[in-house]
């Protein structure tokens, strides 16, 4: 029995030493232009999904997301802060976002598999070691819920309906990021597509 215990401890010690040597060697490719090893990806992905599910459980019941006024506010924030990375129905993300690892997932897919509370939690707190920022210091909870109200409607929104909403709410794209497109968007028939801006 004692021999078995010593063998187990020795094997674990060797494994830990090999793992430490691998990490310190610098061979792990940290480059964003290369994908993770499948095992690294599986570990990160599992931790990511489990963590969102656990922490979002404390968010509580969402407010009434059908309230009038939520959509224009959500759309304004979404165009300003989110579309460059996540796109929108009929709007491609900005080219720079494709150089990120992980690549920001398309918003319509997110809205299909996450609950409103989970979407709220990720927007508010962000995700470590990815490009997903935590908006806690920039946006009030009510503003984040307005974004959630918009995002949860996206799976059933056609590109034309999205463009129509952008036009009818008069939401401009980020001015500082692309003054030319912002100016064009104020003219009658231009559609402010955030993906064209950066
Ligand atoms: C600079 C790029 C960037 C911006 C800006 C950004 N995100 Fe993200 N977002 C990401 C990335 C990258 C991920 C994936 C994180 C991961 O997989 O580790 C992500 C993940 C998410 C997720 C969770 C996706 C899932 O797995 O279901 C949600 C929800 C989300 N973002 C919403 C938003 C909203 C809403 C905004 C605007 C307030 C926003 N993001 C702004 C890059 C961005």
Image (cartoon, rainbow, N blue to C red):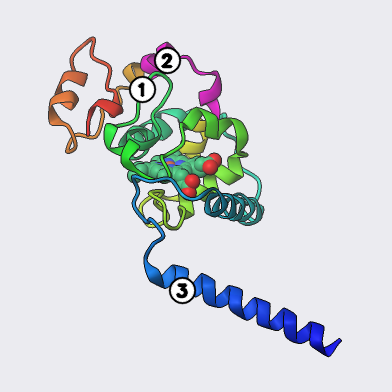
Residue 10 position in % (x across, y down): 67, 82
91 in magenta: no
Q: Main secondary structure of the magenta part?
A: helix
| 9 up-or-down from 172: above or below | below
Which residue was labeled with disc 2? 159
52 sits to left or right of 175 = right
Residue 47 position in % (x across, y down): 60, 56
Q: Residue at x 24, y 34 (%)?
A: 174
Residue 179, image quadrant: top left
Disc 1 is placed on an element classified as loop
Q: Mark 1 packing: few (<14 Cα in 10 Å), some, or many (20+)?
A: some
Which residue was labeled with disc 3? 21
Residue 90, image quadrant: top left
Cβ at disc 3 under 8 Å from ligand 1: no
Q: Nearer the viewer, residue 71 or 81?
A: 81
Examine the rendering and report whether any part of residue 144 can be seen.
Answer: no
Q: Which residues are magenta?
A: 152-165
| 78 up-or-down from 155: above or below | below
Q: Mark 3 packing: few (<14 Cα in 10 Å), some, or many (20+)?
A: few
Which residue was labeled with disc 1? 91
């Amino acid at each position: 029995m004692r021999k078995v215990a010593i063998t187990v401890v020795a094997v674990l010690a060797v494994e830990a030493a090999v793992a430490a040597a691998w990490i310190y060697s610098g061979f792990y490719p940290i480059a964003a232009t290369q994908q993770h090893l499948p095992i690294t990806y599986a570990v990160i992905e599992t931790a990511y999904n489990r963590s969102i599910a656990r922490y979002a459980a404390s968010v509580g019941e969402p407010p009434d997301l059908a309230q009038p006024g939520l959509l224009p506010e959500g759309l304004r924030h979404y165009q300003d802060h989110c579309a460059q990375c996540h796109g929108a129905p009929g709007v491609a993300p900005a080219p720079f976002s494709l150089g990120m690892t992980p690549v920001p997932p398309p918003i319509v897919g997110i809205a299909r598999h996450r609950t409103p509370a989970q979407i709220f939690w990720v927007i508010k707190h962000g995700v470590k070691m990815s490009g997903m920022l935590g908006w806690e210091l920039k946006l009030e909870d009510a503003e984040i819920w307005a974004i959630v109200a918009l995002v949860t409607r996206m799976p059933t929104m056609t590109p034309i309906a999205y463009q129509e909403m952008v036009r009818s709410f008069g939401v401009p794209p980020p001015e500082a990021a692309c003054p030319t497109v912002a100016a064009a968007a104020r003219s009658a028939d231009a559609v402010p597509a955030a993906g064209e801006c950066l």
